[in-house]
Amino acid sequence: MRHLISMLLQNEAGALSRVAGLFASRGYNIESLTVAATLHEDASRLTLVVFGDDAVVEQIVKQSSKLVDVIEIAELTGREHVERELLVARIDGDDDAVDALLARFGARLLQRQGSHSVVEYTGRADEIDLILDAMHRVGELVDHARSGIAAIEQPLVIA
């Protein structure tokens, strides 16, 4: 099963390594890892995705929460959350076909040189997969880079 985990982590040397080491020591490959600064200069938000057994991942999350560098940790898998990933891709294809693809998905053209277009798209991981498949049908997907998932929990709404 896919697990989406969000952590607030102190900005300390080796903090990320210690967290990643917990997952690696249990034989779990981190599929996606995104780390960025927060509003507080002494903390970063780390979002990671792993695929694995629920009980083992739950145990790793509990062990991660005991690390001195971890301020807060939450598994977002079963919670209401918003997640996004950035795709930047270079496609070689007919301008009109590429433009139609961009319009259909709500993607943006960043640069065009000859028949090569550099585009960006932001969406859920499954949406990124869909636009990549569509790009293969429109032209030659020359290169692409994915950012990894950034996610945040939605606040509880009290009626």
Image (tube, helix red, strand yellow):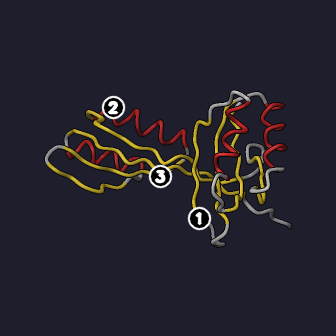
Which residue is found at the position 42% from the left and 40% from the top? 131
Left or right of 121 in this view: 114: left
Q: Which element is circle 3 on?
A: strand
Residue mark closest to the camera, 1 vs 2: 1
Residue tagged by mark 1?
37
Left or right of 146 in this view: 6: right
Left or right of 29 in this view: 146: left
Distance Cα–Cα, label 2 vs label 3? 18 Å
- The one nearer the camera, 20 or 47, is 20
Above or below residue 27? Residue 12 is: below
Please tell me how crowded label 1 is: few (under 14), some (14-19), or many (20+) other residues with Cα within 10 Å. some
Q: Are marks 1 and 2 in contact (CB under 8 Å)?
A: no
* Residue occupying the far left of the picture: 114
Distance Cα–Cα, label 1 vs label 2? 35 Å
- Residue 97, quarter of picture: top left
Which residue is found at the position 29% from the left and 43% from the top? 90
Above or below residue 36? Residue 51 is: above
Kindly identify the amino acid type of the residue bearing the numbered disc 3.
Thr
Quarter holding the C terminus is bottom right
Residue tagged by mark 3?
122
Residue tagged by mark 2?
136
On the image, the x and y values in percent for residue 58 come to: 82, 38
Please tell me how crowded label 3 is: few (under 14), some (14-19), or many (20+) other residues with Cα within 10 Å. some
Left or right of 129 in this view: 49: right
On the image, the x and y values in percent for residue 29 come to: 63, 31
Give the mark nearest the N terminus, 1 or 2: 1
Above or below residue 117? Residue 39 is: below
On the image, the x and y values in percent for residue 71 come to: 77, 60
Which residue is found at the position 79% from the left and 38% from the top? 60
Kindly identify the amino acid type of the residue bearing the numbered disc 2.
His
